Amino acid sequence: MTDFFRKAYSVVSVLLLVEILAQFYFIAAAAFSIWLAEDNQKSIAAAFENAGPFAGLHAMNGSILVPATILVLIGLSFAARYSWRTTGLTALLAAAFILQFALAIAGFAGITPVAGLHAVNALVILGLAAWTVRRNWAFGERGARAQAAVAEPVRS
């Protein structure tokens, strides 16, 4: 059963990575829509209208899908009986995400020097998510070696 949960952890960690990359795409599409507008009222209004759906997707993905996926990943880490290091670093994703949410709130409150850290923290979250994929991949030869290591009795 541990093998199933480890494979599920791998799949969900890839899903989380895709969701995070989508966050970068959504906010970049919104930003470029605005940055590339011509310097006139009509063009700027159209740019904000074009950016709206991308900003909305960024907000929805970041406030619903990403945190739900992180919580599922933490549960799978326990179910897969990963080490405390792995489970702790997976839980660190939740802490980094809570910080991410607080930094977004700082931005909406107009505290831009602090809100600018939202992008830096996003890179930390991306790095942690990539780590979960690379370190705990449960498919192929690497997955078979990891499963064999779990099945072996501990020797002193």
Image (cartoon, rainbow, N blue to C red):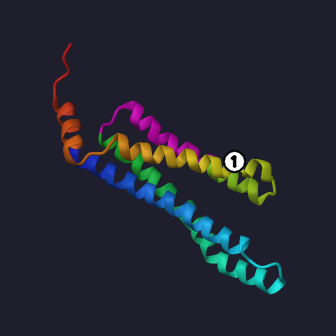
Which residue occupies 45% across, 51% down?
A: 71
Circle 1 packing at 10 Å, graded few (<14), some (14-19), many (20+), is some
Quadrant of the rendered image containing residue 58: bottom right
Quadrant of the rendered image containing residue 51: bottom right
Which residue is at the front of the view, 21 or 115?
21
Q: Is residue 20 left or right of residue 12?
A: right
Which residue is at the front of the view, 126 or 7?
126
Q: Which residue is farthest top? A: 156
Which residue is at the front of the view, 62 or 126?
126
Picture layout, residue 13 above or below residue 131: below
> What is the span of residues highlighted in magenta in the rendered image?
81-99
Q: Position of residue 96 (x, y in %)?
A: 57, 44
Quadrant of the rendered image containing residue 36: bottom right
In the picture, the quarter occupied by the N terminus is: top left
Q: Which residue is mark 1?
A: 117
Q: Residue 34 in magenta? A: no
* Disc 1, SS: helix
Q: Position of residue 90 (x, y in %)?
A: 45, 42
Which residue occupies 20% across, 21% down?
A: 154
Picture layout, residue 119 above or below residue 51: above
In the picture, the quarter occupied by the C terminus is: top left
What is the tally of numbered marks visible in this picture? 1
Q: Position of residue 14 (x, y in %)?
A: 38, 55
Q: Amino acid at mark 1?
A: Leu
Q: Could you tell me what secondary structure mostly forms the magenta stretch?
A: helix
Q: Position of residue 139 (x, y in %)?
A: 23, 48
